[in-house]
Amino acid sequence: MSLEPFGARLRRAMDERGPLCVGIDPHASLLADWGLGDDIAGLERFSRTVVEALAERVAVLKPQSAFFERFGSRGIAVLEKSVEEARAAGALVVMDAKRGDIGSTMAAYAETFLRKDAPLFSDALTVSPYLGYGSLKPAVELARESGAGLFVLALTSNPEGGEVQHAVRADGRNVGATMLGHLAAENADERPLGSFGAVVGATLGDLSSYDLDINGPLLAPGIGAQGATAADLAGVFGAAVRNVVPNVSRGVLRHGPDVMALRESAEGFAEEIGAAVAAA
Ligand SMILES: O=c1ccn([C@@H]2O[C@H](COP(=O)(O)O)[C@@H](O)[C@H]2O)c(=O)[nH]1
């Protein structure tokens, strides 16, 4: 049986818990700071602590797959368990795996993360459209079937992204804007919110030249370690700020391993974000 569409589930979670998304990013340096080994036991303890601290409180947890893949099959097993436990505790899970390939291979990635009974099934998946937006079609179709969502890399938070995303096409629109246009079309007529979101960095400054009104969520990494602040959100996203899911990873995780300190940090970011959205 398929789930209620991701966009509807996300809207409700954002309304009930606030829009903050905290990353589960077990950097080797964080494992060391937490007094853990750079090994499977450390990875397991780190992930379990973040889930215990935050899965009943924040709307979204976003495991960064790379930090689990680094440990091979045993790391993937920890990732599976983290996803399962986070979802069971009430958080939506956005798997940050940034998959993208030719359509037939994309179908296999979609089966991995978006098939309802797959071991790594997640509420949403980050995907890269840089083999052409159309190459994502199998993921779009399976997400619709399962009630999952996608976050498509449109305007990423890193300074190098502009080389690709600001490139201007023959029709005068740049690549990032073109991705936003595709997403607006996917989400047309969806209520209360479409399930096909864009990744748009909170670091990017004034984006008023872009139409961010895609009737879908905007996953906004960059707050904390990359230098953006909650107070920047209104200036960056304008009227679209209500649909922004701000992501903070290291900014929260550096307060571990103490569960209360992780919660206090997340609550601090959530309050700042709430105030910024209310004032916009
Ligand atoms: O444009 C993007 C897309 C994804 N990310 C990911 O978000 C987190 C950010 O972590 P911080 O520690 O808060 O900087 C990380 O998993 C990135 O891979 C991004 O930063 N920018």
Image: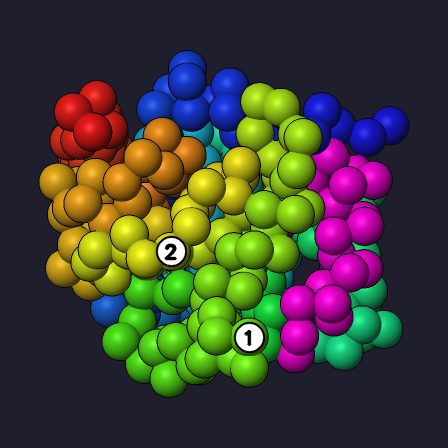
| Chief secondary structure of the magenta portion | helix
- Specify few, some or many for label 1: CA neighbours under 10 Å numbering under 14, 14-19, or 20 or more: few
Residue 4 visible from this viewpoint? yes
Q: Residue at x 66, y 75 (%)?
A: 132
Look at label 1 and name its amino acid: Asp
- Specify few, some or many for label 2: CA neighbours under 10 Å numbering under 14, 14-19, or 20 or more: some
Comparing 274 with 23, the one in front is: 274
Residue 19 spot, x, y in % from top left: 36, 31
- The quarter of the picture showing ligand 1: bottom left
- Between the residue at mark 1 and the residue at mark 2, the CA separation in whole angstroms equals 15 Å
Q: Residue at x 48, y 74 (%)?
A: 172
Magenta-drawn stretch contains 139: yes
The mark found on residue 115 in the picture is: none
Magenta-drawn stretch contains 258: no
**Side of 196 where 117 appears, left or right:** right
Please tell me in which quadrant of the rendered image residue 179 appears: bottom right
The magenta span reads 131-150
The mark found on residue 210 in the picture is: 2
Look at label 2 and name its amino acid: Tyr
Most extreme residue toward the front, as rendered? 171
Residue bearing the label numbered 1: 171
Pointer 1 or 2: first along the chain: 1
State the SS at label 1: loop
Comparing 115 with 35, the one in front is: 115
State the SS at label 2: loop
